[in-house]
Each structure stands twice: as structure tokens, then as C-alpha cells.
Amino acid sequence: MIGGVLLDCIHHFLLLGVSMLATTVGFYLIPFCKKAVLLIVMMAVFGASVGAVDTGGNVLILDLWGDKGAPHMQALHFSFALGAFLAPLLAKLAWGASASTQNHTEPGFDPLVMNRSSEATSDSLFAVPEDMNLLWAYASIGTYVLVVSVFLFALFCKKSSRQKKSTASVQRTRRAKYHRALLCLLFIFFFFYVGAEVTYGSYVFSFATTHVGMEESEAAGLNSIFWGTFAACRGLAIFFATVLQPGTMIVLSNIGSLVSTFFLVLFDKSRLCLWIATSVYGASMAATFPSGVSWIEQYTSISGKSAAFFVIGAALGEMAIPAVIGILQGHYPDLPVVLYTCLGSAIFTAVLFPVMYKLATLPLARQPKGRKSEDQTALLSSSKLNDYEKEK
């Protein structure tokens, strides 16, 4: 919410640079936190800065490329998936190195660690962590984020970036007839979509081990294939977005989600079905969010507050739905509550999108030069469209 308000008041590059800098501070200080209260504060600052980056990144793509930003939007969200895939691997390597050093330590190493830990009294707020490998994992990612923030500040300092921003803001004058209703529906759409995505990704491991009876190693592979196909298809969506309209990609994603979750519920005990349907489900979920942002930009201008509104819906779904499903699954361990939730969310989003499309295609309040929605692109011939633009 704060990021959405600030985006309409502060230069986008400046806000993103400050947010990334705050994220860097969080990465550097979190491993040193000794008190739970201080860790909560640092995680809150970290979460707020990441939330501003999430909202600001979407708005910046729309501000720079407008209707033609679908491939760039897919690339942005592919980077999210790639980072989510690589960062845990780095942490796992750190923990693995830590475990090996504990089993094969050199003489004199353990006393050094004990002395360091004994020097940190129970009243201190900060202390050097005993696991130095984990510290280096945080520090390396934090340094990478710091470099990105420096580039953002450099872009802010260039006068051309200010001129581009002002020029783009003049062109963004489209507003759908039911602008607010459309944003509210997109809020609900992302609430269930992101909620289902995070729910399945979070609980597929425990579901496979407890309900299907898989070994932990096999269940871990199932979790990896979900996020792996998710990240891979987000990368492929960059190229698909150059030839397919965002609405078409949303429809295809909804169909894939419906089919995969239907077979998951129908054959919830089958391991083969679980592997295949999980792969299809991860691939189907990949392009929905960036396509949704690109799709709504075709019909109504998205400001910082508007982007913050539907991003908040996604964040609430990410928090609320997994928490509720975790409680329900605990009360009904014999039922595949996770699969029922994903199927229900797929049905709901598949039904909701045609309603959103109907509202979006109603007559617009204002339509500036050169801004064409996907239904107009499909219906108007190129010659008529050129004549129309010449008359303008």
C-alpha cells in the first residue's frame, strides 16, 4: 500500500533504488539479530521494501512499454521465479558446507566458535552467528541486491529518465468505464490465483508423503518439478508473449490449471498422475500473473495505487489461503483438502475472467491515439486501423 502511494509521488527509479537499498540492509543485518523482537523488526522492514519493489517493478514496466510490454512483464516475473529457484540452492549449499565442517573440523576451530558465542551475552541485540556459511549466503545475495540498487540510482540521476517518465505519463490517459470494478475483480482473481499457487507449492511435499505415501526424497523431487516447470514456462512465456495476446495466455493457463487440478482430485492416490499433473499445473500457473497485469493495461491505465491494489490482493491470498488450508488439512487428514482448494480456485478464476473481459470491453470513457485492445486488434483490419490513425 505504501509503495503504491509513493509511486505516484516519487520518481520510480528513486523509489526502487531506496527499496533495494533497504532490502540490502535487511540481508546484511538479519544473520546478526540475536533477539526475536529485533529479527521481527528487520523482517518487517525487509518485507515492506520487497513489497514496494514488487509493486514498483510492475508499474515501471507498464510506464515504459505500455501495451507492448507483455514480453518485458513476463521477463520481470521470470526473474522472480529464477531468484526463488536459485536462492534456496545457495542456502542449501551453505547449510551443507556447515554440516560438513561440523563433522570434519580442524583442531582449534570449535574453541574459536565457542569463544565467539560466549562473548555475546544474552542481553546483546546483535551477535556474530556461529554458522559463518549461512552469513556468507545472506551477504552474497545482499551484495547482489546492492549492485542493482546502484544501477537504479544511476538511472535516476540521468535527465533522460525524467523526460521519458513525463512523456509516458502524458500518453497514459485510458480509463475503462468500470475502472474500479475491474480492479476489484482483478484483486479477487489474483487473491485466489496466488493463494492456490503458494498453497500447492507449500503443501505438495507433505501431501505426497502423508496422503500418497511417497518417500521424502521422491516428494522433494515432486516439489522441485512444480517450481522447475513454473520457472521454465515463465521463461518460455517471454517468447509466447510476442505472438499471443495476454488474454489468450490467461485462457490457456486457466484451461491447463482446470485440467491438471481435475485429474489431481480424480486420481489423488496415483503417483504417476501426481507427477504429470503437478508438472502441468506448475506450467499452467507460470504466465497468469504477468499476463493479467499486461491484460488490464490494454483497457485502463494503471497507476501506482492501482497496481498496489491488486498486488495487495495477491499478497493477501498468499498469506490467508495457505494458513486456512493448513488448519483444515490438519482437521481432515484423510481428505485431499489441498487439491480441492486448487481445483476450486481454478474453477473460480476460469469463471471470473470472462466477467472481467466483458466489463473491460464495454465502451471506454476516453481512448487516446495508438492504444488498441486485443479485441480491437482481432476485429479491425490493418488497413482500416491505419486509416483511423491517419484521421486522428
Image: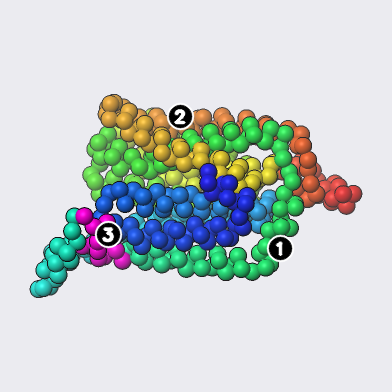
Describe the element under mark 2 as helix, strand or loop. helix
Residue 370, can we see it?
yes
Q: Is residue 199 left or right of residue 176?
A: left
User: Can you name the residue that lies furthest to the bottom here?
Assistant: 107
Give the number of the mark in front: 3 or 1.
3
Q: In which image quadrant can residue 125 be found?
A: bottom left
Q: Which residue is mark 1?
A: 163
Numbered label attached to residue 371:
none
Query: Mark 3 belongs to which amino acid?
Result: Phe
Q: Residues within 10 Å of mark 2 (few under 14, many from 20)?
A: some
Residue drawn at x 26%, y 52% as measured from the top left: 35
Query: Which residue is nearer to you in this view: 22 or 359?
Result: 22
Callout 3 touching callout 2 (CB < 8 Å) = no
Q: Is residue 144 left or right of residue 69?
A: left
Vertical arrangement, residue 64 with respect to residue 192, above or below: below
Question: Would you say residue 135 sits in the magenta stretch?
Answer: yes
Callout 3 touching callout 1 (CB < 8 Å) = no
Question: Would you say residue 345 sits in the magenta stretch?
Answer: no
Numbered label attached to residue 126:
3
Vertical arrangement, residue 13 with respect to residue 330, above or below: below
Q: Is residue 162 left or right of residue 208?
A: right
Give the spatial CA distance, label 2 vs label 1: 47 Å
Numbered label attached to residue 344:
2
Vertical arrangement, residue 94 with respect to residue 342, above or below: below
Give the spatial CA distance, label 3 vs label 1: 45 Å
**The magenta segment:** 123-136
Question: Where in the figure is residue 323, as x and y percent of width and height?
Answer: 36, 35
Question: Which comes before the other along the chain, label 3 or label 1?
Answer: 3
